[in-house]
Amino acid sequence: MSSYLLDTTLATAQATLAEVSGNTSPERVAELAWDAVSTKCPRPNLPTPSYFIASVLKAVGSFARIDLKIYEYRASAPPTLKQWVLSEADQLNGHQWSGESDLSVTSDRLVKRSSRRIPGDDVETWTSWEPSLVNPSIMLRKVNNQWTVSLSANDSIASFLLDDGKASNKNPNAPYVLVTWKKLSCAQLTSDAPLSFISGN
C-alpha cells in the first residue's frame, strides 16, 4: 500500500536539507536526504548498522485512523548511488541529472500503534524479523538547476523540492496518506517504548 507525503513539519529534516542548492553534488544530496528521513544506528555485535524510518500515517474513509510506524532495516552496506542515462528529450526539457540511491536491506521489522484498534492489525511491540521484500530508495532528479528527491519505502512515497523545503502532495485523494516522518535519535529508537516519542496529532 502506498502513502503520500502531505506536509513536512519537521524542522530538523528541513534544516538538514537547507544547504542543498543547484551546485550541490548528487552524492551530497543523497547523503543529506537519507539523513533527513532516516536514522542510522549501530547495533551491538553486528557488523553493519540499522536504518530506522519513523512515520505518522493517516487512513481515511471507513477505516479512518492514525498509524504510528517505525521500521528497522538491516542494511548489508551503506546506500549506493546510480545515475540514469538522460535522453535527448530529457536534456531539452532541462533535466541535468537523474538517478537513484538504494539501501540494500536483508531483513526488516516493524513496531506500530493505531488510533483505531483493528483485531490483528495493532502491534505495540517489535514484530519478528522478516526477509526484506522492498529496498528503501531515494530517487534524485535535477531539473533547471533545482533538485527534487522522492523517498520510497514500505509505507511511504514522499516527494519534495529541496530548494524551499515545501512538500508536493502526489495524490490528495489517496486513502492512506503520510502526514509526516519523524527524525528520532538512536537512544529513542532503541528504547523500550520508541512509539512514545512520536505524536500522531
Image (tube, rainbow, N blue to C red):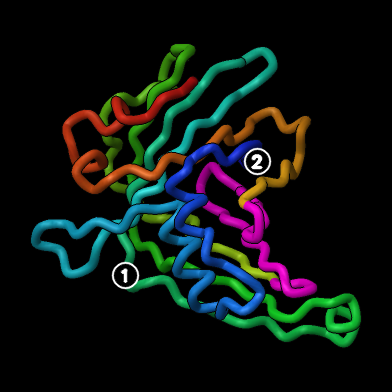
At x 27% / y 33%, what residue is drawn?
A: 194
Give the alpha-carbon distance from disc 1 to disc 2, as whole Å: 27 Å
Q: Which mark is residue 76?
A: 1
Pinpoint residue 84: horizontal percent, then vertical percent. Answer: 67, 81
At x 69% / y 70%, what residue is drawn?
A: 141
Asked if the magenta segment contains residue 201, the reply would be no
Q: Which mark is residue 108?
A: none
Residues tagged 1 and 2 counted as in contact (Cβ below 8 A): no
**Residue type highlighted by circle 2:** Tyr
Q: What type of secondary structure mainly makes up the magenta span?
A: strand
At x 44% / y 66%, what residue is drawn?
A: 103
- Pointer 2: residues within 10 angstroms few (<14), some, or many (20+)? many
Pinpoint residue 7: horizontal percent, then vertical percent. Answer: 62, 37
Q: Which mark is residue 4?
A: 2
Asked if the magenta segment contains residue 161, the reply would be yes
Q: How many marks?
A: 2
Looking at the picture, does residue 182 appear above or below residue 18?
A: above
Q: Secondary structure at mark 1?
A: loop
Choose top left, top right, bottom left or bottom right for residue 107: bottom left
Looking at the picture, does residue 163 appear above or below residue 153?
A: below
Pinpoint residue 93: horizontal percent, then vertical percent. Answer: 89, 76
Which residues fall within the magenta stretch?
Answer: 142-164
- Pointer 1: residues within 10 angstroms few (<14), some, or many (20+)? some
Looking at the picture, does residue 156 appear above or below residue 175?
A: below
**Residue type highlighted by circle 1:** Ser
